[in-house]
Amino acid sequence: MSAGIVTAAERGLIGCHRCGHVVERPSPAPAGDCGRCGAALHRRKPQSLERCWAFLIAAMILYIPANTLTMMRTINPFNSTDDTIISGVVYLWVAGTPELAVIVFVASVMVPIGKFIALLILLLSVRRGSDRDRAGRTRLYRIIERIGHWSMLDVFVVALLVALVRFDLFGRVEAGGGAICFGAVVLLTMMASLSFDPRLIWDTPARHD
Ligand SMILES: [Zn+2]
């Protein structure tokens, strides 16, 4: 049941992803280059699902060391303290700054996990060729894309806040392996969402009409 949706690709139209120029090419013909800006044209992003899966799986794997390895090591003449993301959140909470604890928790736990779940929903539903709530899934993609614009905030907030709270005149703060993994998780989820082509949501691989 396709509910009468005809995509531009099915009409033989290709939009240039660089300049927005719309070119008419009948479907079996090679997409070629954009006549206006010279960019290679694609009916859909090449290997969109495969790339998205690869980046997403890598991000989910790295999210484990991002949480288990040390995010921040605070060293002063008397002792040194290792913090993971969660122990940093607990520290901020106990230290009487629950607002900061909530910001760090949202940026470093809820946002990445939310992105993983949303991308999994999109990937699995596109693979099944689902025609359920396409508009809703497109909105979901737009939300992930919008969050991506300030994704680096996750790393920045965690690094800055833990450093600020633990700041000590005689001490120093070092980023641990967890911070590097977390930075990689943010980059990989951004690349996963950029690889995903939301037009795939509107394609129906097996039409029965
Ligand atoms: Zn163009």
Image (spheres, rainbow, N blue to C red):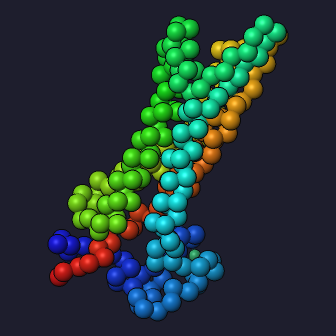
Q: Residue at x 50, y 47 (%)?
A: 60
How many discs appear?
A: 0
Where is 5 relative to 80, above or below?
below
Which quarter of the rendered picture does the C terminus lie within? bottom left
Q: Residue at x 72, y 18 (%)?
A: 74
Where does residue 76 sit, x and y in percent of width and height? 79, 12
User: Horizontally, is 46 left or right of 206 in the view?
Assistant: right
Which quarter of the rendered picture does the N terminus lie within? bottom left
**Residue 149 visible to the viewer:** no
Where does residue 194 sit, x and y in percent of width and height? 52, 58
Where does residue 66 sit, x and y in percent of width and height? 59, 37
Where is 34 relative to 82, above or below?
below
**Residue 66 visible to the viewer:** yes
Q: Nearer the viewer, residue 133 or 166?
A: 166
Ligand 1 image position (quadrant) = bottom right
Q: Nearer the viewer, residue 50 or 35?
A: 50
Where is 120 relative to 105, above or below?
below
Q: Nearer the viewer, residue 181 or 107?
A: 181
- The quarter of the picture where residue 197 lies is bottom left
User: Horizontally, is 143 left or right of 87 in the view?
Assistant: left
Q: Residue at x 59, y 26 (%)?
A: 84
Q: Residue at x 58, y 69 (%)?
A: 18
Where is 76 relative to 19, above or below?
above
Where does residue 96 sit, x and y in percent of width and height? 53, 7
User: Horizontally, is 102 left or right of 157 in the view?
Assistant: left
